[in-house]
Image: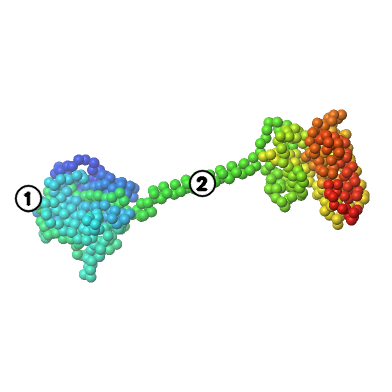
């Protein structure tokens, strides 16, 4: 039968059975003459459905069990009342039952010849059915085929399978295996015998029927009866009809297997669950990734978090970010350490954008001493420009720590040449030039700047040398400012033991005189090579 004829029959003669039970009416006239073929073109009833590929789904796992039925629209003429005979009818169909496990396939599938249409029936209904049982009964697995005729106390049944044509034995067929199974139901009026044959679609039709019932069906059939399928399943099973041919008077046409729709495989049946599982997994993974990135971002941001108060805006041009200093000094690693003193450590660094070498002094500052006033003085000192002063580039403040950024001096501090490098002894001309350079820088601080700047910590460790051995006075971490002609109001003793003037230790007030005293100690130290802070005997030292 051509595809166009099948589509015509599909659209014209099949319908959805959503009606209450009706008895057979002879007012219908079947234009097909009682012979039709459907290879994947069936409509649905109950929970049954037809998928886009033409696969008829009586029940699927998506319907969560239930019952499904399909009947041909027109009742078929099965017997002649005048001569009291039943027509020799035949049908063949291909079905498949798929279940997640063997015991969850449901009650099974039924081919029905019935006097009524609908899922509900009564004892008075006439019917002949071939049943394929998969339900579990009395603790035993059921896998059998049964012929059931209403009104008969006895019936025929046999385990599902087929007899080999060579007589060598019987081959079992698992009804709920998920594999397509073809069934033939044929009634011979002359022999008064109903035969049922089943086999895999990949093998030929066996010559010997699986079941045979020798019985005249005339008393059990009406003149017109409906034909179709009923299926009852579990929530984890799916029942499919792939193709169906029928002839109410003679031999049925064979089913063309190549035209049957494709059964869904395990991947198709579990696709929605896999999609859900994958979606949940991806959602969970995405959430974890977002949380991880969020935590990392928070920690990284908090690592470089700085508090900038409103009053610091005026010092903005002199402020460095902690992140830049952290990168410049490679995280303040010990490998970048230039030296350490009583007020903190000094690290070498390279600014990330300009590649300018810098020296960063990391000191702790007590907020009770007035951070605002301290930064104001630092900002003022940052404006100093003199060849004999180490330029203060700026500062950074973070979590109670203060970072002062200076120009980098390649030769380091003077004390290393005086005490730590005996192989590089300074000659007298170098020593004299260093004294003059420091004196020039100190004079600029005391007399030539718009305010008086008291250094308060003049010593060799705070005198740095450039690549040409030019001395520069540096480290203004303790410096104080005051106007010309006005004494400093500082009341804290600051400086290094051995360089502090006697009056400073008594009054606690720094002045230009206390700086001059420290400078005098420095001149004696560079001249004779003795450290005023140490009791070591330096008589053996070379000059």
Residue 300, how many percent across, how many down?
61, 44
How crowded is the residue under tag 2: few (<14 C-alpha within 10 Å), some, or many (20+)?
few
> Where is residue 509, by image quadrant?
top right
Q: Which mark is residue 141?
A: none
Please determine whether, in this image, residue 124 is positioned above or below residue 172: above
Q: Nearer the viewer, residue 200 or 60?
A: 60
- As drawn, is 253 to the left or to the right of 378? left
- As drawn, is 423 to the left or to the right of 191? right
Q: Nearer the viewer, residue 222 or 12?
A: 222
The residue lying at 25 percent from left, 58 percent from top is 141
Helix, strand, or loop for circle 1?
Answer: loop
The residue lying at 24 percent from left, 47 percent from top is 69
Circle 2 or circle 1, nearest the eye: 2
Please determine whether, in this image, residue 238 is positioned above or below residue 485: below
- Tell me which label, 2 or 1, sits earlier in the chain: 1
The residue lying at 39 percent from left, 49 percent from top is 273
Q: Which mark is residue 82?
A: 1
The residue lying at 28 percent from left, 53 percent from top is 105
Q: Which residue is mark 2?
A: 288
């Amino acid at each position: 039968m051509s595809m166009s004829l099948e589509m015509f029959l599909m659209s014209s003669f099949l319908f959805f059975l959503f009606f209450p039970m009706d008895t057979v009416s002879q007012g219908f006239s079947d234009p097909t003459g009682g012979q039709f073929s459907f290879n994947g073109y069936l409509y649905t009833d109950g929970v049954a459905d037809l998928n886009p590929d033409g696969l008829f789904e009586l029940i699927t796992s998506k319907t969560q069990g239930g019952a499904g039925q399909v009947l041909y629209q027109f009742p078929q003429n099965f017997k002649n009342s005048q001569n009291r005979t039943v027509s020799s009818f035949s049908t063949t169909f291909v079905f498949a039952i798929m279940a997640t496990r063997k015991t969850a396939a449901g009650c099974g599938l039924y081919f029905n010849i019935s006097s009524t249409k609908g899922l509900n029936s009564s004892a008075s209904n006439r019917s002949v059915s071939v049943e394929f049982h998969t339900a579990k009964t009395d603790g035993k697995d059921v896998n059998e085929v049964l012929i059931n005729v209403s009104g008969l106390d006895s019936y025929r049944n046999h385990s599902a399978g087929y007899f080999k044509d060579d007589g060598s034995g019987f081959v079992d067929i698992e009804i709920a295996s998920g594999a397509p199974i073809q069934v033939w139901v044929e009634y011979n009026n002359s022999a008064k015998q109903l035969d049922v044959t089943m086999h895999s679609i990949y093998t030929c039709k066996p010559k010997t029927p699986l079941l045979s019932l020798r019985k005249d069906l005339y008393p059990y059939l009406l003149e017109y009866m409906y034909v179709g399928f009923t299926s009852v399943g579990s929530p984890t099973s799916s029942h499919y009809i792939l193709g169906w041919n029928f002839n109410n008077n003679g031999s049925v046409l064979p089913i063309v297997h190549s035209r049957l729709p494709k059964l869904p495989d395990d991947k198709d049946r579990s696709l929605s669950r896999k999609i859900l599982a994958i979606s949940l997994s991806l959602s969970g993974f995405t959430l974890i990734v977002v949380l991880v990135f969020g935590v990392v971002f928070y920690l990284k941001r908090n690592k470089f978090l700085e508090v900038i108060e409103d009053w610091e805006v005026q010092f903005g041009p002199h402020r460095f970010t902690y992140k830049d200093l952290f990168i410049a000094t490679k995280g303040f690693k010990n490998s970048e350490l230039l030296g350490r003193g009583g007020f903190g450590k000094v690290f070498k660094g390279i600014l990330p954008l300009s590649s300018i070498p810098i020296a960063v002094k990391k000191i702790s500052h007590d907020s009770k001493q007035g951070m605002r006033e301290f930064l104001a003085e630092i900002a003022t000192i940052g404006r100093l420009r003199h060849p004999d002063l180490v330029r203060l580039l700026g500062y950074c403040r973070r979590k109670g720590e203060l970072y002062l950024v200076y120009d980098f001096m390649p030769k380091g501090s003077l004390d290393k040449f005086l005490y730590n490098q005996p192989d590089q002894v300074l000659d007298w001309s170098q020593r004299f030039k260093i004294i003059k350079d420091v004196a020039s820088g100190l004079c600029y601080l005391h007399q030539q700047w718009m305010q008086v700047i008291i250094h308060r910590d003049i010593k060799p460790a705070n005198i740095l040398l450039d690549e040409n051995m030019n001395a520069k006075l540096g480290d203004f971490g303790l410096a104080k400012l005051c106007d010309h002609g006005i004494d400093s109001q500082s009341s804290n003793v600051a400086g290094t033991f051995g360089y502090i003037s006697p009056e400073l230790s008594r009054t606690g007030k720094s002045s230009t005189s206390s700086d001059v005293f420290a400078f005098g100690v420095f001149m004696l130290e560079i001249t004779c090579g003795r450290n005023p802070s140490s009791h070591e005997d330096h008589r053996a030292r070379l000059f």
